[in-house]
Image (cartoon, grey):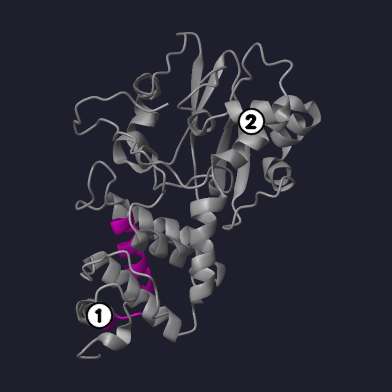
């Protein structure tokens, strides 16, 4: 664990960087981590998983009623069938937006997030204002994201836990009846799967 | 879609940073991966980790805009490992100082190695 390309060209280590290296050194000496495995994890989360995974789940649910039904009953298994499994053994629950119900996901405790389908959370998801305000004033939060829902649409807020993470299945936009699954997936944004966005044609 | 720009008050949502990379700095990615890896080796349960992280995020020193999220992440990890007697605070401080000295002693453009510390721990 001693050789690593350094990004800091004046060779002045950020104190946090030095502390992470100190931890790595200790853990490596104790045989608790393998530097190669650490590199694989970094590469996976930086490059290989992200909202494109969740978008495939949503598009398949829109396209295939049997899959949508499975996703509703057992999201963990349905999502795993596409090759997306959580590393923390967490369970997934898919919550479907309806004309009268909009779903919004938050983690008030820390920042639990469905990594396997959405990658790592955006900055705002981890922020204290989002974590508290999503519960107290979901409509106000949504308006800051440019989402305004009719007064008669109920907003359900789902608070994630270490064991249970939520994926919002947004409503399929009108006019996409002829779209392929791939074309549908391209419409699905990260925010629409957290509930802070809607899916539109042309977004 | 990103939140519209507005003045940052204590309760406003932090503006979305353009995120070509989910980690702002390489050490954040390393700290993240350490937790994933240690959990996979059953060094701690995910509940233990969520509790530790949540404790740091709720501490009075944590910033309101979430910009120090990975600082909290690293502190939580250090605390958890010290609590389990896997690491000691004293030893971690000494190793971090050693890494900093090694960085200073490493010629520009070369990888930093702990062996370059002129005063090894």
Percent across and percent down for residue B96 are 25, 77
The region drawn magenta spans B70-91
Q: Residues within 10 Å of mark 1 (few under 14, many from 20)?
A: many
Q: Residue at 37% x, 18% y: name it.
A: A143
- Helix, strand or loop at mark 1: loop
**Chain where mark 2 sits:** A
Q: Residue B21 in magenta?
A: no
Q: Quadrant of residue B91?
A: bottom left
* Main SS of residues in magenta: helix
Percent across and percent down for residue B22 are 41, 48
Q: Residue at 59% x, 13% y: name it.
A: A99
Q: Is residue B86 left or right of residue A10?
A: right
Task: Give a yes or no on whether discs 2 and 1 share a subunit.
Answer: no
- B51 or A102, nearer to the observer: A102
Q: Is residue A106 visible?
A: yes
Percent across and percent down for residue B60 are 20, 51
**Chain where mark 1 sits:** B
Quarter that holds the N terminus of chain A: bottom left
Q: Is residue B86 visible?
A: no
Q: Which residue is label 2 attached to?
A: A185
- Helix, strand or loop at mark 2: helix
Q: Is residue A65 left or right of residue A127?
A: right
Q: Which residue is label 1 attached to?
A: B106
């Amino acid at each position: 664990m001693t050789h690593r390309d350094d990004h800091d060209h004046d060779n002045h280590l950020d104190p946090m960087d030095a502390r992470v290296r100190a931890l790595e050194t200790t853990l490596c000496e104790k045989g608790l981590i393998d530097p190669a495995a650490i590199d694989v994890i970094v590469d996976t989360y930086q490059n290989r998983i992200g909202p494109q995974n969740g978008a495939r789940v949503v598009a398949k649910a829109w396209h295939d009623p049997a899959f949508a039904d499975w996703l509703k009953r057992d999201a963990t298994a349905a999502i795993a069938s596409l090759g997306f499994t959580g590393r923390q053994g967490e369970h997934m629950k898919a919550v479907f937006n309806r004309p009268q119900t909009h779903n919004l996901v938050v983690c008030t405790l820390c920042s639990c997030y469905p990594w396997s389908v959405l990658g790592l959370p955006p900055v705002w998801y981890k922020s204290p204002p989002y974590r508290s305000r999503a519960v107290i004033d979901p409509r106000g939060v949504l308006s800051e994201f440019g989402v305004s829902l009719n007064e008669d649409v109920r907003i359900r807020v789902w608070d994630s836990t270490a064991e249970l993470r939520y994926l919002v299945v947004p409503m399929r936009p009108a006019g996409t009846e002829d779209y392929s699954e791939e074309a549908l997936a391209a419409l699905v944004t990260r925010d629409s799967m957290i509930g802070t966005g809607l899916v539109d044609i042309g977004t | 879609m990103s939140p519209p720009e507005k003045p940052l008050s204590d309760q406003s949502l932090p503006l979305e940073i353009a995120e070509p990379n989910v980690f702002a700095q390489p050490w954040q990615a390393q700290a993240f991966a350490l937790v994933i890896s240690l959990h996979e080796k059953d060094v701690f349960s995910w509940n233990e980790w969520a509790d530790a992280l949540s404790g740091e995020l709720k501490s009075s020193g944590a910033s309101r805009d979430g910009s120090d999220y990975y600082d909290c992440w690293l502190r939580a990890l250090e605390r958890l490992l010290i609590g389990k007697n896997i690491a000691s605070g004293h030893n971690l401080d000494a190793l971090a100082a050693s890494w900093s000295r090694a960085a200073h002693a490493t010629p520009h453009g070369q990888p930093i190695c702990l062996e370059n510390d002129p005063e090894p721990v």
